Image (cartoon, coloured by chain):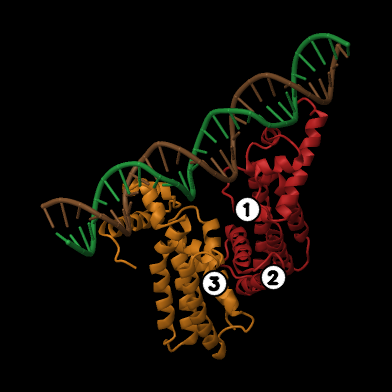
Chain colours: A red, B orange, C green, D brown
Amino acid sequence: MTPQRKDAARNWDRILTVARELVDEGTPLQLNDVARRAGLGVGTVYRHFPTTEALLETVATPRLEALVDHGQKALTDDDPWQAFSGFLTRLVEAQVSDPSLAKVAATADDALPRTTELKQQMMATGTKLLARARQAGAVRPDLADGDIVPLMCGVAYATYVHSDGPADRLPTARRYLATLLRGLSA
Amino acid sequence: MTPQRKDAARNWDRILTVARELVDEGTPLQLNDVARRAGLGVGTVYRHFPTTEALLETVATPRLEALVDHGQKALTDDDPWQAFSGFLTRLVEAQVSDPSLAKVAATADDALPRTTELKQQMMATGTKLLARARQAGAVRPDLADGDIVPLMCGVAYATYVHSDGPADRLPTARRYLATLLRGLSA
DNA sequence: GAAGAAACGGATACCGAATCCGGATGTGTG
DNA sequence: CACACATCCGGATTCGGTATCCGTTTCTTC
């Protein structure tokens, strides 16, 4: 692994910056488009990120990592139910405010190695949080470990279907999640 | 409106049959593909259905109508909660067993006039069912009329994200819906 | 400052969706 | 039956977007 050339590093940053902007404004990622906006050749972008999904994953990764971190911290929370529900709240809030997260979360575990890894970590801490809450008698026993991520994706999706615009998505998502949480609590 | 020519009617049927088959086997609709399978020219298919969505709508319509019918019948049920929850159950079961329904249900109300009309009817009866259940004190007051369809789409989506294959989707969907319903009930 | 490696750029190949129009086919009339 | 006309058919072609390829440029090392 030779140290990367300076121009390459700079361009990598530019691409990621532009991609982040596009994702934030809701525009679907298109590598040609990214190239134009970044003032780079198409080939340059395709060399750094061979597919749209690869770029998307790189954009989403830091935020995914933040979620995992939050989950870890939640494990130290005294109130098991608080910790569990707080974690889920973060999960949906992140998804409705960042389309890239929603996409990678729902993507099959084949491509996107880094995402898969993080999802597994998230599931692991999710499992622990769930176990604690269950042990404390705060959550119904019929919720399986593997249900957490899909359910949060579902809440995010429902929010999407409902929402008229990107504004006031958050309150809707919180309302839906609150309802679901009532159904999960013992 | 001159009565349609016989060959046109026949081809329309063929197209719809093939489309129904494709939807049932989970293949995403592609008009070129439909044409090949139906033994017709591409142009023929495109004349009958100018867009993929138009064909999808026509495929989904009968099943949507069946759902609306069921909602109407549910209005005569003695038990308001039973009627309401049964209606929702049908909604998700239909979506997870028929991708075309899931797609049109989540599509914005701009294109797909017929679908929009049916969705509005469904929302109307959904509203009535909800009102009855609420009046009977069976459902929490914080659920709005416009939330029903999005929530059912969300449950269907969660099922999708979770499921490994098209088999045993139904039990998962039922489980998720049951959880949600617990959250909705007073 | 010359050589070689690494990266750039955009013209071009490619792929699937949608159009367009010359030709075929069904339908009403003498 | 045959003619005329409208309707419909079919697939070659266009079109919009994605991905590749390779001659040129830029960086790094000595």
Subunit under mark 2: A
State which quarter of the image contains the C terminus of chain A.
bottom right
Tell me where residue A42 sits by quadrant: top right
Amino acid carrying label 2: it is: Arg
Q: Residues within 10 Å of mark 3 (few under 14, many from 20)?
A: many
Amino acid carrying label 1: it is: Lys
Residue placed under numbered mark 2 in the picture: A174
Query: In front: A141, or B183?
Result: B183
Subunit under mark 3: B
| Circles 3 and 1: CB atoms closer than 8 Å | no
Name which of mark 1 and mark 2 comes first in the sequence: 1
- Count of numbered tags: 3
Residue B141, given in percent of the width and then of the height, sits at 62, 84
Please give the name of the residue rendered at 73% of the width and 55% of the height, measured from the top-left corner: A24
Q: Distance of mark 3 from mark 1, alpha carbons?
A: 22 Å
Residue A173, given in percent of the width and then of the height, sits at 67, 68
Q: Are marks 3 and 1 on the same chain?
A: no
Residue A17, given in percent of the width and then of the height, sits at 78, 45
Question: In the shown orientation, is residue B111 left or right of residue A120?
Answer: left
Subunit under mark 1: A
Query: In front: A152, or C12?
Result: C12
Please give the name of the residue rendered at 65% of the width and 70% of the height, measured from the top-left corner: A177
Query: In front: B44, or A119?
Result: B44
* Disc ID at residue A103: 1
Q: Distance of mark 1 from mark 2, alpha carbons?
A: 20 Å
Residue placed under numbered mark 3 in the picture: B149
What SS does tag 2 mark? Answer: helix
What SS does tag 1 mark? Answer: helix
